[in-house]
Amino acid sequence: MNTKASTDDFFASIAAKSDSGALRGDYTHADERFVVAQNWDAYTPQQHQLWRRLYERQARLIPGRACDVFVESLNALDVSDGIPRFDRTTEALFKATGWELVAVPGLVPDQTFFEHLANRRFPVTVWLREEHEFDYIVEPDVFHDFFGHVPLLFNPIFAEHLQEYGKGGLKALKLDGLAFLARLYWYTIEFGLIQSPEGLRVYGAGILSSGGEIEYCLTNPAPRRIPFNVERVMRTLYKIDSYQETYFVIQDFQQLFNDTAPDFTALYQKLKACDALPADTLLPAETNLIVA
Ligand code: PHE
Ligand code: FE
């Protein structure tokens, strides 16, 4: 159903939501899947230099904070030198888990996004933020998309899960369950924490690509850290313009896979009938994991 009409809806809804009334990327050369050429040669030396600085800052924060699979895959990727070539990474990634990277101008319609994931294609934004956005950026750029998301795609269970998520997204569109599935993505793929024998670790891309939240989420006493539960996550609202008020903690990626495997049809029905919880909720029965 990737019709001209749904594409027009996408741009209309973006225009209504954002101040500038437009997305930042150049969508004029995108094909019907919103894919573009990365055009790697067009990046300037200044942009590669900015990537290196973003990478260095983040790489210094990673040890002891990111989960092991992230650290290992990031190192193997060898992308500290400048904005990576997506085709080079795809070669290694395809061998590891059968995923490919596709270049996109920026955010894409939900349907398109889910179709990519369901087919093991991960959309990566081509443009890099500007100097004044070093610490904070509104729309995802190539640094967030690549640094934050790509390393975990090398993990077979995570890779499997993300494909299932994509299929689940296409299904949720038909069941009017998108709001719930979006919360699941937010609190796992973007802002998830994972338990390790050495303590809490980060696997969410929104945290891994953030200079401030990566420390905050693990040690600041203010936010809640609650054991992951699908229904609880799907009921919980989130903020997009501040650090999270609640983090959900998985035991391992197998748990994420297993807990999201059941058919969500009945769950969506149930959730539609109950109120959403504010982002800072702690229910009476819940334990807030204490951090050092
Ligand atoms: N099990 C979900 C459903 O039936 C699909 C899904 C899988 C969603 C994995 C998210 C993650 O709708
Ligand atoms: Fe992201």
Image (cartoon, helix red, strand yellow):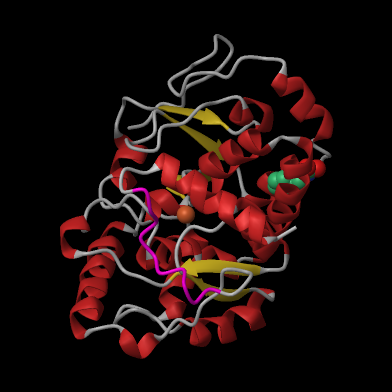
Q: Is residue 164 left or right of residue 234?
A: right
Residue 53 seen in the figure: yes
Rendered image quadrant of residue 131: bottom left
Vertical relation: 38 (above or below) 195: below
Rendered image quadrant of residue 38: bottom left
The magenta stretch is: 21-30
Residue at x 74%, y 51% (from the top left corner): 170
Q: Is residue 170 left or right of residue 25?
A: right
Residue 157 seen in the figure: no
Residue 94 x, y percent position in the rendering:
64, 80
Residue at x 24%, y 75% (from the top left corner): 52
Please, what is the dominant secondary structure of the magenta stretch?
loop
Residue 155 x, y percent position in the rendering:
61, 66
Vertical relation: 106 (above or below) 210: below
Toward the top, the furthest residue is 284
The C terminus sits in image quarter: top left
The N terminus sits in image quarter: bottom right
Vertical relation: 117 (above or below) 269: below
Residue 286 x, y percent position in the rendering:
55, 17
Please tell me which residue lies in front, 267 or 30: 30
Rendered image quadrant of residue 181: top right
